[in-house]
Amino acid sequence: MSITGECFCGEVKYNLNGTLRDARSCHCSRCRKAFSSQASAYALVEANEFEWVSGENLLTSYIGKHGFGLQFCSKCGSTICGVFNGSVHGVTLGCINGDPKIELGRHIYVGSKANWETIADGVPQYLESVPENA
Ligand SMILES: [Zn+2]
Ligand SMILES: [Zn+2]
């Protein structure tokens, strides 16, 4: 199955020849800023299954201290993917086209969520992180 995604203006497009893994939503204050939202919505990909289709030249990056960063469309500002040490690490669920057949599996850092957010029941919530393979 191939999954496609694109930014708000449509200039940046990607194709994923594989599956999304470990979809999660992080409610920490840093993710709220990075995703301009109540939380992140993000799933992991295999870097070798991911390819840019168009607009790669429009990408701009913000790389944090630990080698993990995010890439954005410099034209419309959509946050498209996460990168780790230069390779694509995951994608934002919001920029995926259609139904990627994955659901958020956990809410993390719920202990520091915004007071204005109410998280729906039914998905495991963790006050902080959980081990990567939990
Ligand atoms: Zn764009
Ligand atoms: Zn976070």
Image (spheres, rainbow, N blue to C red):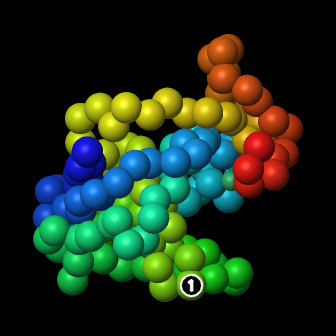
Q: Quadrant of residue 132?
A: bottom right
| Residue at (67, 58) in percent of width and height | 30
Q: Is residue 27 visible?
A: yes
| Residue at (52, 48) in percent of width and height | 21
Q: Position of residue 41 (x, y in %)?
A: 52, 44
As drawn, is 36 to the left or to the right of 2?
right
* Residue 78 vertical placement versus 126 (above, below): below
Residue found farthest to the top: 121
Kindly tell me whether mark 1's CB lies below 8 Å from ligand 2: no
* Quadrant the N terminus occupies: top left
- How many numbered markers are drawn? 1
Q: Position of residue 89 (x, y in %)?
A: 50, 67
Q: Is residue 36 visible?
A: no
As drawn, is 41 to the left or to the right of 19?
right
| Residue at (47, 79) in percent of width and height | 87
As drawn, is 92 to the left or to the right of 98?
right
Q: Quadrant of residue 74?
A: bottom left
Q: Position of residue 127 (x, y in %)?
A: 85, 38
- Identity of the amino acid at label 1? Asn
| Residue at (29, 32) in percent of width and height | 99
* Secondary structure category for the residue under label 1: loop
* Quadrant the C terminus occupies: top right
* Residue 26 vertical placement versus 87 (above, below): above
Residue under label 1, please give it. 85
Q: Position of residue 35 (x, y in %)?
A: 51, 53
Determine crowd level at label 1: few under 14, some 14-19, many 20+ residues with C-alpha closer than 10 A.
few
